[in-house]
Image (tube, coloured by chain):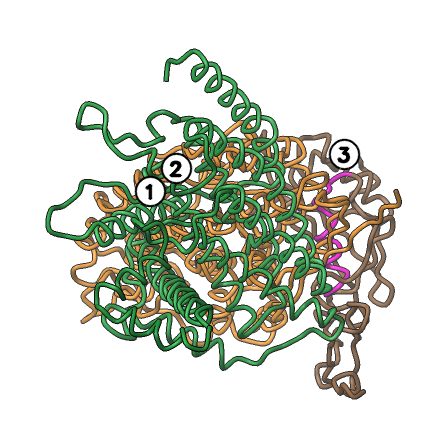
Amino acid sequence: MNAAEELKKALPDAVTKIGMQCNKPEATVKKEDLLDAAAKAQELGFDQLSVITGVDYEDRVEVIYNLFSYENKHNLVLKVILDHDNPEVDSLTTLWKGADWLERETYDLVGIKFTGHPNLTRILLPEGWNGHPLRKDYDMETEQFVTIGEDGDDVVSTDGSNLLRRK
Amino acid sequence: MTNAYELIINILTALGVYDMILDMFKPSGTEFVLKLIIVVIELAVLFAFVLVTVMFLTWMERKVVAMVQSRYGPMVTGPRGLLQPVMDGVKLIGKEDIVPAKADKFVFNLAPYLAFVPALLVFIPLPFGESLIISDLRVGLLYIIAISALTPISILLAGWASNNKYTLMGAMRAVAQDISYTIPLALAAITVVMFTGSLSTVDIVSAQSGTWFGIIPKWFIFIQPLGFLLFLIASIAEMGRIPFDFQESESELVAGFFTEYSGMKFAMYFLAEYAHLFAVSGILVTIFLGGWNGPVLPGIPVVITSLVYFLLKTYAVVFFAMWLRDTVPRMRIDQLLNIGWKIMIPLALLNLLVTGFLITAGVI
Amino acid sequence: MQTDELLINMGPVHPSTHGVLRFKLRMDGEIIKDCQLVLGYLHRGTEKLGEMKTYQQVLPYTDRLDYISAFPNNYCYVKAIEELAGIEVPLRAEYIRVLVMELNRIVNHIVSIGSLLMDLGAATMIMWGFREREKALQLFEMLCGARMTFNYIKPGGVREDLPEGFIPKLNEFLEEMEMRIKDYEQLINSNEIFLMRMNGIGVISAKDAINHGLTGPTLRGSGVNHDLRKLEPYSIYHDLDFKACSRPEGDSYARYMVRIDEMWESLHILRQVVDTMPEAKVISTSKYGVAPMTGVPSTVSTYFPRIFTPPAGEVYTRIEAPKGELGFYIASDGSTKPYRVKIRSPSFCNLTALSGMVKGLKIPDLIAAFGTMDIVLGDVDR
């Protein structure tokens, strides 16, 4: 029995589908039950959260959590499928501190909101950036200009007005 | 002959021109003008010497670092890169002199000079050789310690006036460091004074002439090994060099107190740093390593041999400081202060006490 | 007396932030109350670029992630493609891959230790290190013509076989390196000031380290002996004799020592690879595998279809890069371009733990702890 099946057995209602991500067992989880499923997985020995990936599939958004168990040397993939226009899912920062930045990055680039995250701000792009670049509908034509304002924060504009410094 | 003034007069007399020159001034009763002229010449020579030394030291530093790190160092300007300091100077003079908009301009401009002047003044009671001394002050040692304690004032002014957090932190560190290291420095030097009974640098040097059993020179390092060690560590901290270069510590504070300086003012700090390095090494040599004492060579005037001995010893100490810089990392400021207050000052006091007992008991 | 907190903005342009990282520090005198990190100054959108290029075209971008050690980046991306499409790789190619990756691990650790010592104020180590690194870079140049951005490991093998005279030069390098690592240890390990600066600084417990998602030497410095080369042996690592190095203390010195130990292990691995490297021609029968090309003297495939369409699917592959666990997630929709490329970079994930580690320490400790995390900003910001 692989890890996904184990999780299905432990939480039959939360896990809607099990399969494989290439060679790793994958469990698709209802988005309401993600926190429970992740906590269960942690109980099962999956102590490392390797990566959080957000993928925009135009009709839906998927968030993929790759877990690994250092003790048993097992992999487990959790997947949640979210609404495309308003993707929102529980944050795992309470379980893994390492989820903090990974979730911020996913929020920044894919635009997924993690409810319960202590500091859900952009991490790679400046605050105030328009759009989330890894969305398929991201506007690639509009240029955006970033400068540093008086108080040290980033200022973003689309017309370059902030680039001119006149006194 | 006790100092350079008399040395010059002696040379002039030997050449047979002194009386002639004196006669030129005597009728108008202005002999003091001649005196002044000679003093100015002395100081000019000293100033030129310090400048050339500093330039040489910057070149030497880079060469020593390069040797340790298996590189060549500067090689292009002049033979073996000897003219590199000149080019550096030209470059620095050519740089724009930037004063930060929110800096205190007067203090900001004043601070570099305040750093450079004490570094020069330290040389006045420093005996470069037999009678090669500008002035044999009776409080020579005290004067040296007092003058070198002026440097942190300039650093504090620079750090404060720049209106920058890094410079301010560098300045605060420099002051804390200087206060805690001037004390063991002075305490270590006092033990030597207990032997000589005089603060005059000339007396200290002449007390170290001669040898024991014809082999071991009578240097204070052999009587005061602990005092020497304390003085060495404290003086490296005074120079502000790795492992104690907190005032700059470029990986933490960018460039410490002179972050905002550019061009000639930056060069001033640079000059002061190396002048200080040379001066402190010279003082260390004077107090502990026998000053200009060395075997007398027949046929060569003592003035020349003593100067050579002094320079050799001083450059050895300078080399040690440079070598140290390439070998060890920087300490942390609180660790340094801990060592200063908790280890070095008690040790210095103990050393003082033991020395006092031994002298009273007549052992040494 | 009224005191005030000092806000210090370290970076993005600062001598010891290893690039363009920015620390926002709230200080009480010299003591750090709070440390926030601001990233993104080197963000080049590699993941977005990955969606817009064909599979082969993405490869050069992976060189630019962790530019100190580009071979593992190459390899991890290629490995993801190979797993996705089920490509078999000739054995000799796998040997060459491990060879270059381990060589790169040595180079990476040299730079890491050198810059750590540089941050501590001892500039000698980085110069010594670069002397040896230069030799390794010359080997890389011999191999693929590039010194830092290699683009050498290709799907289905490597670009070219080892050039003539490579192995003798490598052996020379290995011999010299053995002597040099001893030199480094002599210079650094027992230096009292270095120990004062490193011992007990930036401590992170094993549990916290795992919870924060630390990997690589940074994790193993906390006494967790996890190395993906051992846990999930990829390539030919299961045939090699080596051990994962770890230290129990969890402080900066432990992290530094793990790197030194790993350099020794890498030398050991390289010796074995050189000794056991197969000469025989290896022919793969899989769809994208090695075509037995006539006239190509080497045993390594250079054949890979120009129009490459892997089957639709998802894959997440990770390897033990010098800095930690490097992962590539690729989602394919069956076209010539990846649908989504996600890079799990070790530097980014390791950096998560820094602000917790340095709370209550001083600025010099921040520099020391940060130096032992071994960060490359190209890898953090991607």
Q: On the picture, is C121 further left or further right than B75?
A: right
Circle 2 is placed at which residue position? B204
- A99 magenta-colored: yes
Task: Out of B333 and B55, give the one closest to the viewer.
Answer: B55
Residue B291: mark in rendering? 1
Quarter residue B44 falls in:
bottom left
Q: What letter labels the chain drawn in green?
A: B
Tell me how far mark 1 sits from mark 2, CA to CA: 8 Å
Looking at the picture, how far across and down is residue B254, in whole percent? 59, 59
Magenta residues: mostly which secondary structure? helix
Q: Identity of the amino acid at label 2?
A: Ile
Q: Secondary structure at mark 1?
A: loop
Dot 3: few (<14), some (14–19), or many (≥20) neighbours within 10 Å?
Answer: some
Region in magenta = A95-109
Circle 3 is placed at which residue position? A40
Q: Secondary structure at mark 3?
A: helix
Dot 2: few (<14), some (14–19), or many (≥20) neighbours within 10 Å?
Answer: many
Foreground: disc 3 or disc 1: 1
Q: Secondary structure at mark 2?
A: helix
Q: What letter labels the chain drawn in orange?
A: C
Q: Identity of the amino acid at label 3?
A: Lys
Where is B258 relative to B2, above or below?
Answer: below
